[in-house]
Amino acid sequence: MGTTLSSSLTEIRELKKEVTGLRMDLKRFIEHANQQHVQTALTDLKQNYAGLFANDQVETAKSELSANMVTDCGMRDKCYGVFLDFLQNTSKHIKDGQVSEEIIQSYRDQLKNMREAGPFDRCDTCFSQVYRLFEKQVDLMQSLGIYAENSSTDDIIMDIPEETAVRELLEPIANVLRFQILKSLAAQTRTFSDISALTGLRGGNLLFHIKKLTDTGMILQRHERGDYVITDKGFKTLNAVSELYRETHHP
């Protein structure tokens, strides 16, 4: 009797191990399938809409430079042309399948050299606009999976910028509804109506949460009134949360 009971308990333990192993294999398979879906969606975005994204960045640069550059400066028109030419050149990389760290750094160095050649202290006002517009392009490239910044193994936790990390990583997903939206987009693209049906939110209430995710590069809209799709940043964020959850919540 005792031997039979001991044997049964051993079998149960072995079965539990097998079930746990199968569960982990299934999770890995789902994550891999979802990642393939995300990569397919991002590839579709880059192939079909990269030109629109690039043109939008140029139009934004034109309007924001015109509105924010120093007005009472004799070099304004010349600098405007130089800045716009720079931003048009950098925006072309949005159409590329991949942009290296070296290329991005070369543009940053170019901007730095241009600023050092600027004759006036108030040149900072205009250059700050160019820096901002260029970094917006870089953010878009990262969201589309075109550019991945090299990470150093020497980076330590103390180097994490607190405000940026909270604003751009933690706040967007620190809400049940936004996290639900992000998870749903990891499985498939969805329309505004789909997300409304999923969350029960409508109109401005739903737009508020969608804007939080789009503004931080977690999701993108294919085009005006088009489907929403998770970005590379959004998917990596979900994967990081999933990994953390598995490590801290044992089955």
Image (cartoon, rainbow, N blue to C red):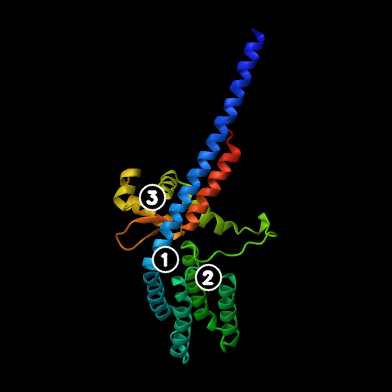
Image quadrant containing the N terminus: top right
Amino acid type at circle 3 is Gln
Judging by the rendered image, the residue that carries numbered circle 3 is 188
- Label 3 Cα neighbours within 10 Å, binned few <14 / some 14-19 / many ≥20: some
Does residue 169 appear to the left or right of 66 in the view shown?
Answer: right
In percent of width and height, residue 88 lies at: 44, 79
User: For the point 45% across and 71% down, which residue is it?
Assistant: 94
Kindly report the distance in space between the C-alpha atoms of the residues bearing marks 3 and 2: 26 Å
In this rendering, would 235 be left or right of 196? right
Q: Where is residue 67 in the image (x, y as percent from the top left)?
A: 40, 78
Label at residue 227: none
Residue lying farthest right?
154
Q: Nearer the viewer, residue 134 or 28?
A: 28
Disc nearer the start of the sequence (1/3): 1
Mark 2 is surrounded, within 10 Å at the Cα level, by few (under 14), some (14 to 19) or many (20 or more) other residues, namely: some
Residue 163: give x, y in percent of width and height: 56, 58
Quarter placement of the C terminus? top right
Q: Is mark 2 on a helix, strand or loop?
A: loop
**Residue 214 shows in the view:** no
Instruction: Name the residue type under label 2.
Output: Val
Q: Earlier in the sequence, mark 3 or mark 2?
A: 2
Q: Is residue 198 above or below residue 130?
A: above
Q: Residue at x 68, y 59 (%)?
A: 153
Residue 143 vs residue 22, the one in the foreground: 22
Q: In the rendered image, which residue does mark 2 sit on? A: 99
Mark 3 and mark 2 in contact? Answer it, CB < 8 Å.
Answer: no
Residue at the spot 48% in from the left edge and 91% down from the top edge: 75
Q: Residue 46 — which label?
A: 1
Of the residues shown, which amino acid type is indicated by label 1? Lys
